[in-house]
Image (cartoon, grey):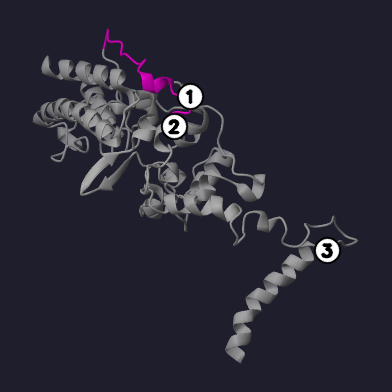
């Protein structure tokens, strides 16, 4: 019986608090009428639950939810990790503009991007244009939230700094998609102007229109999974609903045509990686810039490595902005081959 009473105790406390919230007292304003406001969303019938549950299922398989990088909370010397790897760090950065090292954290979740208990709706925390670390502004509607983190981070030391590269992850880091999509941020060689006006650059809501597209039948891709691909029969298939501007008749067609382009771009990018590795400027796995004595020297050599890492870590294999990616790749490859 005691255990039963202990189990009920939290419910009793919760009920007491809800009751107090609904009371009209002499010392403060009236609270909400019991649980009425809470139950607009936290209900077990098919009203809001019918809307929220599919979103929760989609998000459950997303990279943001499944990643374990939320343990990268930052340090006093390098606090920036928490800003993009944790919900608490993102919230703090958006509210204050400060990067904060954390002792505890949770992975990126609904409450990183949304504040329903504050705003009483599902609007985004970030709506204004984003100042990119490299380039100008990123201003593409709903995807401005994405660009807070999905952009190249500052390099330390800078491309032109005389200081040697001593850190493992020198360069744009792993998520410079906002730069590539908007055609900004690559190192510019003398007398070179990169093309930037590809069709994807003009999409009003940027990332959102493709990565949060309508789900295909009977699988999860798009929506709050943010996935453009899904797996079927052991193959990775593209959700053609995320490529609606192309008018492709089926997911099979979308997959075939996209893969043909990506394979060609990947071949060219790999050749650039080999050229840089032959100089000793890249790690053996082509993921990082070399450190210490073998690191690329300041100026154009370091800029060439930055451009390679920007395109590699974008992970779209040129798709996010074909003209920009192709022109950056061609110019970088031409410089390396001539020096």
Mark nearest the camera among 1 and 3 is 1
- Could you tell me residue 181's position as x and y percent? 37, 25
Q: Is residue 160 left or right of residue 38?
A: left
The residue most toward the bottom is 1
**Label 1 crowding class (10 Å Cα cut-off): few <14, some 14-19, many 20+?**
some
Q: Marks 1 and 2: CB-CB under 8 Å?
A: yes
Of all residues, the one furthest to the front in this rendering is 249
Residue designated by label 3: 23
Residue underneath mark 2: 209
Q: Give the vertical position of 104 relative to 9 (above or below).
A: above
| Local secondary structure at mark 2 | helix
According to the picture, the residue beneath numbered tag 1 turns out to be 204
Q: Residue at x 33, y 27 (%)?
A: 320
Q: Is residue 152 left or right of residue 43?
A: left
**Contact, mark 3 vs mark 2 (Cβ under 8 Å):** no
Residue bounds of the magenta highlight: 190-207
Asked if the stretch drawn in magenta spans residue 193, the answer is yes
Majority SS type along the magenta span? loop
């Amino acid at each position: 019986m005691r255990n039963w009473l202990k189990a009920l105790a939290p419910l009793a406390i919760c009920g007491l608090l809800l009751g107090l919230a609904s009371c009209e007292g002499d010392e403060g304003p009236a609270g909400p009428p019991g649980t009425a406001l809470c139950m607009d969303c936290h209900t077990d019938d098919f009203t809001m639950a019918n809307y929220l549950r599919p979103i929760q299922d989609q998000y459950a398989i997303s990279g943001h939810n499944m990643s374990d990088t939320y343990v990268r909370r930052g340090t006093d010397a390098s606090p920036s990790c928490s800003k993009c790897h944790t919900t608490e760090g993102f919230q703090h950065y958006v509210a204050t503009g400060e990067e904060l090292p954390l002792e505890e954290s949770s992975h990126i979740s609904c409450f990183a991007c949304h504040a329903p208990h504050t705003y009483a709706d599902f609007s985004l925390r970030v709506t204004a244009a984003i100042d990119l670390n490299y380039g100008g502004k990123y201003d593409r509607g709903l995807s401005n939230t994405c660009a807070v983190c999905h952009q190249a981070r500052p390099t330390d030391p800078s491309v032109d700094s005389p200081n040697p590269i001593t850190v493992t992850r020198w360069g744009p880091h792993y998520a410079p998609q906002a730069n590539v999509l908007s055609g900004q941020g690559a190192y510019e060689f003398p007398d070179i102007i990169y093309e930037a006006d590809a069709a994807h650059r003009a999409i009003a809501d940027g990332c959102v229109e493709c990565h949060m597209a309508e789900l295909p039948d009977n699988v999860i891709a798009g929506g709050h999974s943010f996935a453009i691909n899904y797996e079927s029969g052991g193959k990775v298939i593209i959700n053609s609903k995320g490529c609606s501007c192309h008018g492709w008749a089926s997911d099979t067609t979308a997959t075939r045509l996209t893969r043909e382009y990506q394979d060609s771009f990947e071949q060219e990018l790999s050749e650039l990686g080999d050229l840089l590795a032959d100089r000793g400027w890249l790690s053996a796995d082509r993921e990082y810039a070399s450190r210490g004595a073998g690191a690329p020297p300041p100026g154009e050599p370091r800029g060439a490595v930055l451009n390679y890492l920007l395109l590699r870590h974008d992970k779209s294999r040129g798709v996010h902005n074909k003209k920009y990616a192709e022109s950056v790749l061609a110019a970088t490859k031409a410089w390396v081959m001539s020096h």
